[in-house]
Image (cartoon, coloured by chain):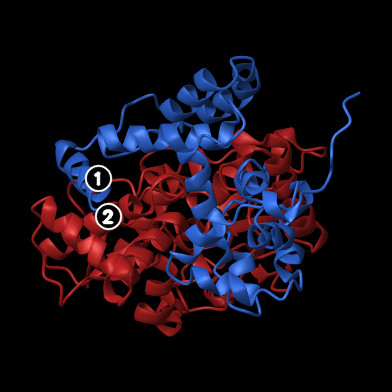
Chain colours: A blue, B red
Amino acid sequence: MKIQRTIKYEGELDRSLLTYLFSLPEGEHIKRCIQCGTCSGVCPLSIYMDFTPRKLVALVREGFSQEVLSSFTIWLCSSCYSCTVSCPQQIPITEIMYALKRKAIEEGAYPRRFPVPVLAREFYRMVFKNGRNSEALLVLRLILKTSLLKALSYMPLGLKLLRSGRFSLKKERISRPSGVRKLLKAAREVKP
Amino acid sequence: MRFAYYPGCSLKGTGKAYEKSTLAVFKALGLELIEIPEWNCCGATAYMAVDELASEVLSFRNLVLAQRMGLQRVVAPCSACYLNLLKARKAFLSNDPKRERLCSALKRAGWEYDCSALPEVLHPLQVFTEIVGLEKIKERIRRPLKGLKIVPYYGCQLVRPYDGYDDPIYPVKMDLLLELTGAEIISDYPLKTRCCGASLTGTIEEAGVRLNELLITEAKRRGGNVMSTLCALCQFNLEMYQGKMKVNHKMPVLYFTQILGLALGLGEKELGMEHLLYRPSLEV
């Protein structure tokens, strides 16, 4: 058994993530958090999270940047906005979760082969390439990039879709996706 | 009345019954939907997790395409598409630094558009309840849906937080619309805006399926025998994952446009009823 220190010294804290959040529109609202826990209470997924949304906000503010970026919490957020519409301090929590996801992808701080960021990335690529997303092909890419074993568990679902005439392997594509690509590239270039 | 129609990816794939029934109901109500040529994906929640500006640019392109059709209103039936279009529109009309970045990205890509008149974004529910009006729809009901006990389920993204035409936690517009069909409405369903988990059913199945299981179990406990949805992903999750739940309830999950269409007397084929796994039983 490895004996490890379970708390951090103040000198080890890193508030870079907080600074990043402050740079976003309404990002400074995170200062208003009173730690009431309404977000955690209304969140349908907080019961699966390693840190509930309330704890996550506290950790960001104190400077536990690495812990936050590598948490499962941000990937369990389904962007349903119930925290955002319920927060008594009007903190845009869902937008903060999105910002944390972007940072975690940028820094490669998510668990390898963890399906949520993989799906986000594959989705991004598919739309970049074709202008549209093809559902079945996207799921196939997800299986290839995460776990081939999972393919088996998708079989009954595929059969149900087939039976109800909703399964299609057709690649959805707009006739000139280059226009979309040009626009997306331009968006990348104007980054502050 | 003419509207630009933004189907989104799901309505061309697993949600094709939503497209069929939406088009059929609009036609029956004398409204014209014209698909935006060359529309692109709204980016869903995935783009926001990778690149925020890219996500807004994607939706903005669709709004500009609609503008070029000379139409002032875009109809988006999928909740995620609807939210993204609204959000891009809001970012553009606001004064925050995002707007400037959005405009310079468009300029750099050589896009021209008229800033003064960005089309309005509407969900079909809004068109039915606010533009057509409940009175007019009531006059057109041909087949009262006796025997159905409908649980209206709104899901999350439609009513939040950019919308503002219904309550974000306890909306009622779909309840009021479906009441016209003569069916019984279970209006005390407390989970009407609790999230279905979106793509979590495919990524973290245990959590995703469980959310849907709670939604269906409660719908049944409240006496419902059919659930009404207004988002392609909610319908997919609620219907397709029932086999993975502890109890297989075989609860029919319809699009609200299918239910409305049935009451308007439209044919099953027109409404894409053959794509359902579980059919509701209607008294004749």
Q: Quadrant of the N terminus of chain A?
A: top right
Q: Are marks 2 and 1 in contact (CB under 8 Å)?
A: yes
Residue A97: in sight, yes or no? no
Residue at the location (12% across, 53% down)? B108
Other-residue count near label 2 (Cα within 10 Å), few / some / many at <14 / 14–19 / ≥20: many
**B273, B143: nearer the viewer:** B273
Which quadrant of the structure image shows residue B218?
Answer: bottom right
Residue at the location (47% across, 47% down)? A102
The image position of residue A101, as x and y in percent, is: 52, 47
Which quadrant of the structure image shows residue B205?
Answer: top right
Residue at the location (44% across, 35% down)? A121
Which quadrant of the structure image shows residue B78?
Answer: bottom left
The image position of residue B231, as x and y in percent, is: 50, 55
Residue B124: in sight, yes or no? yes
Q: Write down the chain letter for disc 2.
A: B
**B209 versus B42 height, above or below:** above
**A22, B208: nearer the viewer:** A22
User: Tag 2, which secondary structure?
Assistant: helix
Residue at the location (67% across, 70% down)? B184
The image position of residue B123, as x and y in percent, is: 40, 66
Residue under circle 2? B57
**A137, A157: nearer the viewer:** A137
Q: CA distance from mark 2 to mark 1?
A: 7 Å
The image position of residue B150, as x and y in percent, is: 65, 63
**B156 versus B16 height, above or below:** below
In this rendering, the count of numbered labels is 2
Other-residue count near label 1 (Cα within 10 Å), few / some / many at <14 / 14–19 / ≥20: many
Residue under circle 1? A184
Identify the amino acid type marked 2: Val
State left or right for residue B56 relative to residue B182.
left
Residue B258: mark: none
The residue at the far bottom in this view is: B135
